[in-house]
Amino acid sequence: MVRGGWGTVPPRGVPGPGGAWQDSNAYVVSAAGLFMATVLALEVHEFVALGQPSPVQPRDPGVFLLMIPFLLCFGLPVAVVGTAAVVLPVAVLAAWLGRRFTGHEAWWWVPPASAGLVAVPAAAVAVWKEPGLALGTWLVGTSGVAVAALLARQAVLRREARRPGLSLRTVLLYGTLLVAVVFALGGAASRTGLLDVYSPPRMTRGPLTGTWSDGGGGTLRLSPDGTAEAVAIRHEPPEGAAGGERCGGTGTWRFVPDDDPWRQAVAVAIPDCALPEWSVGGTADALRLHHVCGDPDSPDVHTLARVR
């Protein structure tokens, strides 16, 4: 006997949600669901990033909406591969766990199965990067994979129950509506102050004096009399110039104020050091100096932290 809804038990002889491997519609709606979940995660990240200290002014989240059509070019192929490599195995594992421990499969086995498989790449991120990033990867990955696996599961169960199946158009339509709702809510929250939007602290010359370090052996000392002393500081020498990526010496510095806190800067002039203006960032309690170089779409950021 077949019961409708999420608790459907497939009739004897029917492969159940593990049959997503043989169901092309389940594969398609799962890939579409994974893609839309990724778009939603990126959209939420855009709004969260508004409140995080950054060396460059964050772009308006509205720009992200314009990028969605371009995401289709590489996002959908990645979603198709991800469906085959992760989502459908999760659907099969969840069905097996349900039959193994409760005698029948059920939808609530999908989240723990997703969490277990996504924990593997998250652990790799923890080893090679940092635990905080690994936790975020695990939470976001688990959510996206679980949603896609549930869509695949529902598509198979609808087919087995001979009910109208989920369609690609339905998944994309509701996913797009959800993206629009999140954008509207996030935009309203940022404009009304409910969502913090980061801005560099307004600065004067005094707090900038002292010693700054890049954490890699390079230091920059800014004295109250306008003298600047650099030791092994990273710089951008002209192409073909003698010397390495680090330089040192004595020169001068000055603070460049501006009504726009993003345009406040520290100008340092040291012979043989190709140093652009350093922008002021961080927070009032943890000041940072930044200068950005390289490709604007993937910049290389040099950061100095105040040490004393």
Image: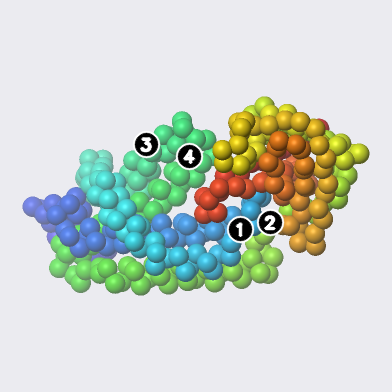
* Residue type of the residue flagged with mark 2: Tyr
Q: Is residue 75 left or right of residue 201?
A: left
Q: Which numbered disc, 1 or 2, marks the residue that appears first in the sequence? A: 1
* Image coords of residue 281 (percent x, y): 72, 49
Image colouring: rainbow
Q: Is residue 295 left or right of residue 122?
A: right
Local packing at callout 1 (Cα closer than 10 Å; few below 14, some 14-19, many 20+) is some
Q: Secondary structure at mark 4?
A: helix
Residue bearing the label numbered 4: 134
Q: Which numbered disc, 4 or 2, marks the residue that appears first in the sequence? A: 4
Query: Looking at the image, is mark 4 or mark 1 nearer the viewer?
Result: 1
CA–CA distance between discs 4 and 1?
23 Å
Q: Residue furthest top?
A: 217
Query: Looking at the image, is mark 3 or mark 1 nearer the viewer?
Result: 1
Local packing at callout 4 (Cα closer than 10 Å; few below 14, some 14-19, many 20+) is many
Q: Residue furthest left?
A: 13
Q: Secondary structure at mark 2?
A: loop
CA–CA distance between discs 2 and 3?
34 Å
* Residue type of the residue flagged with mark 1: Pro
Residue bearing the label numbered 1: 58
Q: Which mark is residue 120?
A: 3
* Image coords of residue 109 (percent x, y): 32, 47
Q: Secondary structure at mark 3?
A: helix
* Residue type of the residue flagged with mark 4: Ala
Q: Residue at x 65, y 35 (%)?
A: 234
Q: Is residue 202 left or right of residue 176?
A: right
Q: Quadrant of residue 243?
A: top right
Q: Residue at x 81, y 37 (%)?
A: 251
Q: Are marks 1 and 2 in contact (CB under 8 Å)?
A: yes
Query: Looking at the image, is mark 4 or mark 2 nearer the viewer?
Result: 2
Q: Residue at x 65, y 49 (%)?
A: 55
Residue bearing the label numbered 2: 198
